[in-house]
Image: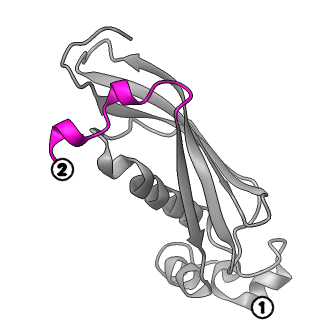
Amino acid sequence: MPDDTLLHFEDMPPGTVFPLGPKLVSADEIIAFAMEYDAQPMHLDAEAGKASILGGLAASGWHSCSMMMRMMADSYLLRAAAEGAPGVDFVKWKKPVLAGDVLSGESRVLDSRISRSRPEIGIVSLRHELRNQDGETVLESENPVMIRLRETGSTDK
């Protein structure tokens, strides 16, 4: 995508909201992710999931984060002048994500500033929240993302 059609730092002021999802979570994908990355019984077998405190076949928390990352990419990151992220401030898994759940939510810009060491880059702080089909929050997260400024060296923020 040409740089002039991308979202830049200037396009992401505090208060900007990007919708996430919806995403239907299937039993097959929960099991496939678990087999590869988190082979605990509650992520591999419906009966083991029901017998656990999770109450059913549940996605790994890391799978939930991966699904959120895909929703973020589809919503805004793939059309942004993004340069990556320096880390994650926190992730909270609030409720189990179960087979058959439909996830949706939003990413909200909390704050933005221009990098002191790299003035062509802005740091955009985002808060992400995913909810299931019943409106229950299943995941919360915050992290900064590095986004190029449209005009290199702009200091109007």
x and y percentages locating residue 146 in the rendered image:
34, 32
Q: Main secondary structure of the magenta part?
A: loop
Can you identify the residue that label 1 sits on? 47
Farthest top residue? 156
Q: Are marks 2 and 1 in contact (CB under 8 Å)?
A: no
Farthest left residue? 2
Residue name at image x 39 percent, y 25 percent: 123
Q: How many marks?
A: 2
Amino acid of disc 1: Glu
Q: Is residue 11 magenta?
A: yes
Q: Nearer the viewer, residue 65 or 24?
A: 24
In the image, which residues are magenta? 1-16
Q: Residues within 10 Å of mark 2 (few under 14, many from 20)?
A: few
Find numbered disc 1 in the image and state the secondary structure of the residue it sits on: helix
Residue 83: name its quadrant.
Answer: top left
x and y percentages locating residue 42 in the rendered image:
71, 79
Can you identify the residue that label 2 sits on? 1
Residue name at image x 52 percent, y 64 percent: 67
Of badges 2 and 1, the one in the foreground is 2
Left or right: residue 157 compared with residue 103: left
x and y percentages locating residue 9 in the rendered image:
34, 27
Left or right: residue 99 compared with residue 115: right
